[in-house]
Image: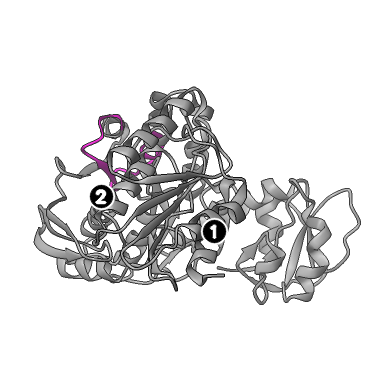
Amino acid sequence: MRLWASEVAVATGGTLIGDDVLLDGATQDSRAVTADCLFVPLVAGRDGHDFVADAMEAGAGASLWQKGRDPVSQPVVLVADTGVALGDLGRAARRSVGAAGSRVVGITGSVGKTSTKDLVAAVLARGGTTHASTRSFNNEIGVPLTLLGSPSDADYLVVEMGARREGDITDLSAMSLPDVGVLTTVASAHTGVFGSVESVARAKGEIFDRLPLDGCAVVHADVEEALAQAGRARCQVVTFGDRGEVRARSVRLDADLRPTFQMESPWGRSEVLLEARGAQMVPNALAAAAVGLVEGLALEEVVVGLAEARLSPWRMDVATARSGCTVVNDAYNANPTSTLAALNALVALPGTGRRIAVLGMMAELGEESSAAHTAVARHAESLGVEVFAVETDLYGLVGLDGTETALGALTRRSLGTGDAVLIKGSRVAGLEVLAERLLSGE
């Protein structure tokens, strides 16, 4: 989105110092600066003001600057708080895309937000210009950056929304004002923060509170905690899942875990092939199909969009290592629901070789943490999967000390053709590094 620096000042209640330049998008990361963007120096673990000079040298057109400090460059917009100002800019961007007629789709849920976002964006792209973040930009920083990154002429804008407490989705919805709200599922994720699954459900259900009368709530019919939240919507509700209006029949996986299924809906039936891997991606695809269909896309276009969708990195990436073994890199994040699904996908791979799961901890589970990790370990045992735990003993195993130790343990197994390894853990585990090392054979 293109904004004049003077418009930034008006939206944030700030003061422009220097030339009134035309800005294109925004970033808070000096390593991600694009030509003429607005640099937003946030004050968190590190002070973003220390990187303003680098951002300007890299091509930023202007920056925000928190009052009480001497600016190191111009143009600059002085504001009381750069974090608050970023939210103000997100709201201004939403008003702009709304005035241009863009439709906004908001997506939340305990599992599958980013994958569903990728699938929805691919589907809606069959119907018009579509913008979505390329990463998991789903909080008070990522959502306004997604809004600011949208082209002014976008027909659709897809916004992912995460929550760490009740009220977060309310705030993000007030900023992004979705026309369509998607609740992927409710599960035991972040219960250490929320306290209970019931609290998680209430927080995720906030996405339905602000939907307009001509909007649509899209919700998982097979998850009672999710379906119960649909009553908060004042608009049309469309369900997906085995018991939903948009559902899958005869699901099959090919040798690379790509699902094929017969999709049934009030709009018709069609065979669907996904590039996204694993049976757990089928509900996400159904949610994306529901969005496309309620937005008026032809069934044939929805099917093409689903087939063309490519997911963000480290989500069920299936590749072959130099040794010949299959590596499933699902290292972006982990909770009990997604980890159990990933284990099921691991054993669904063809071949009779060994099945090994390298698991980091599942974070933020609170009092449920011990029981959840034990349940995963027991499920892996029931499937005949050997588990290597990395830097955690919660699975009932002595944790391997870091990725180097884990790589050494895998190397000693002399893995080859027919063997398969799953890499999965919460972000704190950082296991994507191990997956890359295993694939390269280094």
In terms of secondary structure, where does tag 2 sit?
helix
Residue bounds of the magenta highlight: 205-225
Residue position for label 2: 283
Q: Which amino acid does label 1 sit on?
A: Leu
Q: Nearer the viewer, mark 2 or mark 1?
A: 1
Q: Horizontal and vertical percent for residue 389?
A: 50, 43
- Determine the residue positioned at 52% across, 70% down: 441
Q: Is residue 242 above or below residue 297?
A: above
- Determine the residue positioned at 34% across, 61% down: 419
Q: Is residue 17 visible?
A: no
Residue position for label 1: 434
Q: Measure the C-alpha gap from mark 2 to mark 1.
A: 29 Å
Q: Horizontal and vertical percent for residue 19?
A: 79, 72
- Near mark 2 (Cα within 10 A), the count class, few <14, some 14-19 or many ≥20, is many
Q: Horizontal and vertical percent for residue 135?
A: 51, 60
Horizontally, is 34 left or right of 220 in the view?
right
Residue 323 belongs to the span the image colors magenta: no
Picture quarter with the C terminus: bottom right
Horizontally, is 334 left or right of 337 in the view?
right
